[in-house]
Amino acid sequence: MSLKASQFVAARPEKANITSERIETIVWYVHECFEILLKDNPKYSRKYVLDHTSFHLEDYLKVEFVDSYLIANKHLITTRLSALEEINFSYETEKRFIDIDGKQKKDKIDIYINKLGLKEEWKTADEHIYFVLECKRISSLPGVSSYIGDIEKFCQRSYLQLRLPFEGMIGFIETKPLSPATISDEINTQLVAHTTIKTITPLAAVSFNKTVNDTYISEHKKSYSPFSVFKIYHLFLDYTDQIIP
């Protein structure tokens, strides 16, 4: 969390609650869009992506989900919360940050979500008030180490502009019998042994949708002063029936 974000949360808890409501509405909406995807039952061929696109499979799944579902169904989110009527979804937006080594670098955000209706609360430009969803494929339990790598980045990166004290991650589950429960247990096991990530609260299941049980929340501490605590929403989406050879 940036110093500005830390001061904001400490001084104005009621405004932090407004921000949290917006973020959790977005998490709910991602679930709704994934439910629509499952009903549509699209198939994503590894061979097609390899032969006919320049995307890695992970990126192809991401852009398809944004273009075909998150953008296409925005009426659902505005019906639930009118304050998000101008919400915007895009991908591979770049922001600047200072790494743990002190160097200024570029951060390519997988899914960038802005226009959250929070300009007055945060007193800054809409472009700097955003929520992110970083995406990773998960095909095995040992493979969650790359997922944990993104958690580490959240801890170590200090952004030049505002960064909300809420982050998001999507895990595309590729193979059976992996499940959100087994994946979250493995992530928690690896977090316990991790030497640079300070975990305040391990992944714990939460429910934003009556029919979906694939979301978890964890809390971690930034690796730089003032060592603020931030929250991560973890969404594990089961693509095992969608991905084909």
Image (cartoon, grey):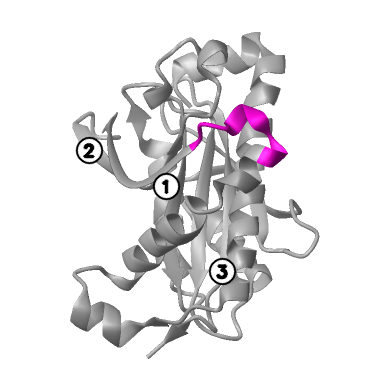
64 relative to 117 in the view: left or right: left
Alpha-carbon span between mark 1 and mark 2:
16 Å
Q: Which residue is mark 3?
A: 37
Residue 150 is situated, as x and y percent measured from the top left of the image, at 41, 51
Residue highlighted by disc 1: 152
Picture quadrant where residue 229 is located: top right
Q: Amino acid at mark 1?
A: Glu
Q: How many residues crowd around disc 1 within 10 Å: few (fewer than 14), some, or many (20 or more)?
A: some
Question: In the rendering, at what x and y percent does residue 36 appear?
Answer: 61, 66
> For the point 51% across and 19% down, which residue is it?
5
**Can you tell which of label 3 and label 1 is closer to the viewer?**
3
Q: Give amino acid for label 3.
A: Leu
244 vs 233, left or right, is left
Residue at image coords 41%, 27% = 224
Asked if residue 200 can be seen in this view, the reply is no
Q: For the residue labelled by badge 1, is the local secondary structure a helix, a strand or a loop?
A: helix
The quarter of the displayed image where residue 14 is located: top right
Name the residue located 61 percent from the left edge and 17 percent from the top edge: 9
Give the distance between the C-alpha atoms of the residues marked 3 and 2, in whole angstroms: 32 Å
- The magenta span reads 79-87
Residue 6 higher or lower than 144, as above or below: above
Q: Which residue is mark 2?
A: 106
Q: Nearer the viewer, residue 179 or 56?
A: 56
| Residue name at image x 33 percent, y 67 percent | 60
Please provide percent x and percent y for residue 236.
Answer: 58, 64
